[in-house]
Amino acid sequence: MLIREMVLHPIAIADPPLRSSYGLHAPFALRTVVELKTDSGITGISETYGGDGPVAALEAARPWVEGMDPFRLAGLWARFNADAASQTGSVAGGRSQTYMVPGENPLDRHARTFAAIEIACLDAIGKAVGQPVCDVIGGRVRDAVSFSAYLFYKHAGGGGVGGDAREDEYGEILSAKACVRSARQMIEAYGFREIKLKGGVLDPAEEIASIKSLREEFGAEYPLRIDPNCAWSVDTSVEVGRALKEELSGGGYLEDPCAELEGMAEVRRRLLAEGNQTPLASNVATTCFADVPKAHGLDAVQVVLCDPHYWGGMRQVQQLSHLCEVLGLGMSMHSNSHLGVSLMAMTHVAAASPHLFYACDTHYPWQTEKDEIVEGGRVRFVNGCVPVPGKPGLGVSLDYDQLARGRERYNKIPWRKRDDEAEMRKHVDPDWKRVLPRW
Amino acid sequence: MLIREMVLHPIAIADPPLRSSYGLHAPFALRTVVELKTDSGITGISETYGGDGPVAALEAARPWVEGMDPFRLAGLWARFNADAASQTGSVAGGRSQTYMVPGENPLDRHARTFAAIEIACLDAIGKAVGQPVCDVIGGRVRDAVSFSAYLFYKHAGGGGVGGDAREDEYGEILSAKACVRSARQMIEAYGFREIKLKGGVLDPAEEIASIKSLREEFGAEYPLRIDPNCAWSVDTSVEVGRALKEELSGGGYLEDPCAELEGMAEVRRRLLAEGNQTPLASNVATTCFADVPKAHGLDAVQVVLCDPHYWGGMRQVQQLSHLCEVLGLGMSMHSNSHLGVSLMAMTHVAAASPHLFYACDTHYPWQTEKDEIVEGGRVRFVNGCVPVPGKPGLGVSLDYDQLARGRERYNKIPWRKRDDEAEMRKHVDPDWKRVLPRW
């Protein structure tokens, strides 16, 4: 089986005005759907980051991909790595990953591009051999993958524009009270059993109040985590950690409270000195394998967030699972705005990663049926989990009408790159800048 | 595809009187050949440790194996691990791994037993999907796997007894001169490009002379390594490291000169202080994943020896390759007395482990055609390498007549466990004991 053709589908999906320390989500999120058509008639699919950059990077890899045997992935990974190593170290333009949305770091581009190809190859292999992807890569260790209720502060509006506008079932969420309301809605709809709040948006006192209200509403059986994406100083991080000692215990964590491993390490030291064992998680200070032993050595991070989309695909996430196990670190999973193909990739790799004990993040509740590209409509959750399908490959196929509609939307809009900062300036505050630490 | 039946073939193979710090090889080495017969008519094979212990451990796993889907390996690995974790920590009887031949540590039994099943499952999968095993587990990164000329000091004799006795093409090797002669023979026959000497047998001065003679004979393009299996004190290790600074540089290493990570770390510190960068390798102080970060933290080991037979199979060796890469450690491969099925398993996992840069160990030259169980006779080397086959699975099949002869040999002999110490007492010195350090 050889890959005959790579087909790229850039699409846009309506996205609500979600807030984070990076700024504001634009009315549309960009994705790219990859199809690898093989000479045996089987097509492998994947979903990855959208816009000009990711599409150009995939286009650049076309000569390596077309004609390759999808089973020979390690050789392709070696090519990508050699190519990345030959680039200058200044490719990030001197900006630390801290300032970028995970998945946007130019230094990791090769890992993201390879991941999109690897996942589509694994889907093709699964279809060819009649096995679900999780069993192709070593075998499932669970039959259902747990996801968390991923709460955001947001402005009113469901995202999209004109005929592509979407209903806003959550409304404005800019207070602790609204936050609890949205959690209740999301848990009723999906059955989630863990809750994550994207913070770094409101005053820390209000975000502390949000977490405390969530604990009051749902009780200790719903582990809680908060992620301000480095919006806080070390002092503020320690204060929040102290205020939420009880609420973040029992399966929760404090994610990227402040910038840089050194800052995280200081927060950890100061909390531990008070007898506060709250684990610190990260997907900003640890985005590649070289970061992990460093983070471990400094005790800066106790839970590493994986993501097959930017860690180099499914087998690299399995390697991360193993590395975390050996080093005594926990592992959780990061998410971006995504549709059903990505959700299934996340589900399969989570099913085949033994050391993943936390519920995974997912933005899926913020997207809707209207934009779903998966045949048969949106992937269904059962008690907060996605059941691992028994079908070969990822277990989902593309709805080409929906894909065409996604592409139309993409062609209509001017965005070709996510820019949450510009969006904030446009809609909320003309002088807004990402400032770290903000509090 | 489900496994219908596990068939175990205990066999014995003639083994020359090789010496090491553990003692003396008996006239026969024991192996077990595993067949997993599936309901689709495909049979997966593997080769592992021999004798009562390994056979009993495999028998105990029979209820888990028969009826399982060979693709669901991670679930089986989790079962083995949970079972091992539930055993008491005293299973090693208080003896440190240092005193045992790698592959004999009771604490690692579950990893060895699982490995034998995993490799046979991967062979079955490869045959079912029409792919070589290296491509089933992620894809080859090389088309041929390099092995080293593995020299031993030995007494005269080819091994075996009576009708099963074997020709001794190498003769007695108990001096530097004989050592060079055997290297020449082996390199002429196989084309090896790296040389390993099993030391810890003669006075260190004679072993230093052996390495120096090898360097004189073959030059710097043949990297050299010596492995006394912990026979030396820290002082002696430093002295040998100092004497062989030049000879062990350029792709060579000093393997397990002394016992325990702390001892290795002291040797490293003292050599580094003299500007001697000779890497220290180990398969005695690092035999499981928990050892690796400890060894790295102490800078006690710079090259970890993998072995799919006792590290838990092929995917675990790939995990080790990745772990070594992330921690900046080198990786090489250990070997035991083995036949062609093991050689092919070593070849496939080496082909799919990107970070394996050293030539692998192999005892293969010490076994002969007469005992080979692989159809078509012994696996052929090309320029010291085993070419990665294009055939599905491991790429070799069983010669059932030869297997039956191996079983007959097994039934005729009294050994059911390797005991190099007893063998020394029987044939060389009635009072011999393994003493560490000996020098």
Image (spheres, coloured by chain):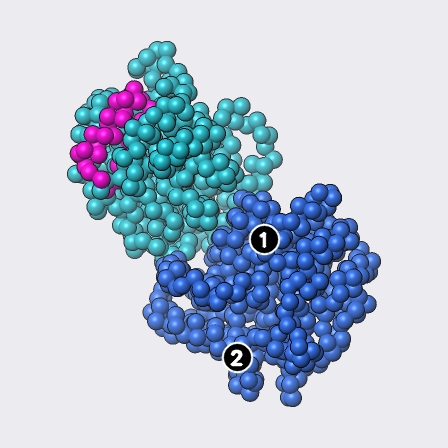
Chain colours: A blue, B cyan
Out of A352 and A60, give the one closest to the viewer: A60
B95 within the magenta span: no
Quadrant containing the C terminus of chain B is top left
Q: Mark 2 lies on which chain?
A: A
Which residue shows up at 54% across the image and 41% down it? B80
Where is residue B250? Give x, y as percent: 29, 41
- The stretch in magenta equals B192-220
Say which amino acid is labelled 1: Leu
Q: In this view, does A183 lie to the left or right of A257?
A: right
Q: In this view, does B411 lie to the left or right of A281?
A: left
Number of numbered markers: 2
Which residue shows up at 65% across the image and 52% down it? A280
Out of A367 and B280, give the one closest to the viewer: B280
On the image, which quarter does residue A396 sit in?
Answer: bottom right
Say which residue label 1 marks.
Answer: A261
Q: Mark 1 lies on which chain?
A: A
Say which residue label 2 marks.
Answer: A416
Q: Is residue A198 left or right of residue A329?
A: right
Which residue shows up at 27% across the image and 35% down it? B246
Question: Considering the numbered disc 2 on the image, is that residue within a helix, a strand or a loop?
Answer: loop
On the image, which quarter does residue B274 sit in?
Answer: top left
Where is residue A36? Give x, y as percent: 42, 71
Question: Considering the numbered disc 1 on the image, is that residue within a helix, a strand or a loop?
Answer: helix
Q: Is residue A241 left or right of residue A98?
A: right
